[in-house]
């Protein structure tokens, strides 16, 4: 591989371009063909999420310390964009998810999640949005539209992922700040999926609307640390994934008002090898079992359904990044049922933080490292 840096210009500003020249790419075996991997760009510090711009040639990438960059498929990588909020960059905290507004062509709004400092050194997840400037160098008029309350994290379990439902709502998948009981407490946002309007308003048909002592944004509860979320393109329904403790990573299909069990119901134990103090078993009456569960935690993260036409053998697959297992998990689906699983790209030895399907039908991955990479992944079918 040959790497060299040059300076170029895109949309009126300087870019530092780091080009990765890969003659044929790397190839790895799978059940349905050879998986090809091409490095697009490198040098990111713990990248967390990516979002493609409408031109299909450029994307936004977040770095956990608080930087947002514009990246080209030619390997170009901008200086950090201005207008990004100050983040709580400690342990797992920092700048996290990024999504474009459903009406981006008209409003140019970029949505971010990030860890935000509160009182007494504690932090929580916030959601904000700002307009991407015409020259693509900054976010303008950034505003916070949601804050996880209260702020309880000392640096862990922020979640978080954003998903637009196509009907004017935004789902936010949140962590429980490693404060287990809060997942069952409806006066707190910890361990919840929340559903808000695109401006942060509370939809009038949310399941707990109007109830005293309940945060009105809550959609579902009993979650631990949600690191992946995506809208199923065939059903239009939200799916999420979350970290268990030692064992018990889950995929869920969160329904309005339902309780997904944590910490009362879990397939895992504490990192100390002792039981979770509040746990009553793997299944508990009144709580929803996971749609899919791993007894040994792969450390699930970003996720994406594959419905592009480019690689038919990947159709009806759900791809999930794995941090601990250092792999790309492919779940084969029959409707909503998981009928097969394979672990891809273990040879890379990389923690896969985010997974998205590009407009060209390739998968795009971010590896979580001090020298994180943007990878393009395809398939040569058998």
Image (cartoon, rainbow, N blue to C red):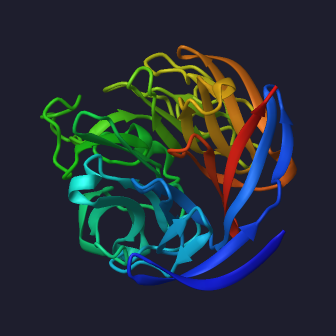
Image quadrant assignment for residue 299 = top right
Q: Please indicate, yes or no, whether residue 122 appears anywhere in the rendered image.
A: yes
Q: Please indicate, yes or no, whether residue 297 appears anywhere in the rendered image.
A: no
**Residue that appears at 25% across and 74% down:** 140
The C terminus appears in which quarter of the rendering?
Answer: top right
Q: Position of residue 30 (x, y in %)?
A: 82, 32
Number of marks present in the image shown: 0
Q: Position of residue 144 (x, y in %)?
A: 25, 64
**181 or 351, which lies in front?**
351
118 relative position to 355: left or right? left
31 relative position to 216: left or right? right
Image quadrant assignment for residue 17 = bottom right
**Residue that appears at 52% across and 31% down:** 264
Q: Is residue 367 above or below residue 9?
A: above
The N terminus appears in which quarter of the rendering?
Answer: bottom right
Q: Is residue 33 above or below residue 227?
A: above
Q: Position of residue 152 (x, y in %)?
A: 41, 61
**Residue that appears at 36% across and 62% down:** 151
**120 or 110, which lies in front?**
110
Q: Position of residue 329 (x, y in %)?
A: 71, 36
**172 or 119, which lies in front?**
172
**226 or 362, which lies in front?**
362
Q: Is residue 377 above or below residue 71?
A: above
């Amino acid at each position: 591989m040959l790497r060299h840096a040059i300076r170029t210009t895109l949309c009126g500003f300087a870019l530092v371009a780091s080009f990765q020249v890969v003659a044929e790419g790397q190839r790895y075996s799978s059940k349905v063909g050879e998986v090809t991997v091409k490095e697009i760009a490198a040098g990111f510090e713990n990248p967390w999420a990516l979002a493609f711009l409408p031109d299909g040639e450029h994307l936004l990438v977040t770095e956990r310390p608080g930087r947002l960059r514009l990246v080209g498929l030619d390997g170009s990588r901008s200086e950090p964009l201005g207008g990004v909020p100050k983040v709580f960059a400690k342990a797992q905290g920092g700048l996290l998810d990024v999504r474009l507004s459903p009406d981006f062509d008209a409003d140019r709004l970029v949505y971010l999640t990030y860890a935000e400092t509160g009182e007494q050194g504690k932090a929580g997840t916030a959601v904000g949005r700002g307009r991407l400037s015409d020259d693509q160098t900054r976010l303008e008029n950034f505003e916070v539209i949601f804050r996880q309350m209260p702020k309880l994290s000392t640096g862990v379990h922020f979640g978080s992922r954003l998903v637009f439902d196509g009907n004017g709502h935004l789902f936010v998948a949140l962590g429980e700040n490693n404060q287990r009981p809060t997942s069952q407490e409806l006066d707190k946002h910890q361990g919840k999926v929340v559903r808000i309007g695109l401006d942060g308003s509370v939809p009038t048909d949310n399941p707990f609307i109007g109830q005293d002592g309940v945060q009105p944004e809550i959609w579902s509860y009993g979650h631990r640390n949600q690191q992946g979320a995506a809208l199923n393109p065939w059903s239009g329904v939200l799916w999420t994934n979350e970290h268990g403790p030692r064992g018990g990573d889950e995929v869920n299909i969160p329904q309005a008002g339902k309780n997904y069990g944590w910490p009362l119901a879990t397939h895992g134990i504490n990192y100390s090898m002792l039981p979770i103090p509040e746990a009553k078993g793997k299944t508990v009456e009144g709580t929803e079992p996971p749609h899919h569960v791993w007894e040994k935690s792969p450390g699930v993260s970003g996720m994406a359904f594959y419905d592009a036409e480019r690689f038919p053998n990947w159709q009806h697959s759900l791809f999930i990044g794995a941090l601990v297992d250092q792999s790309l998990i492919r779940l084969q689906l029959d409707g909503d049922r998981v009928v097969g699983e394979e672990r891809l790209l273990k040879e890379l030895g990389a923690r896969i933080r985010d997974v998205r399907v590009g407009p060209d039908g390739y998968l795009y991955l971010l590896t979580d490292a001090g020298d994180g990479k943007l990878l393009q992944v395809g398939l040569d079918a058998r």
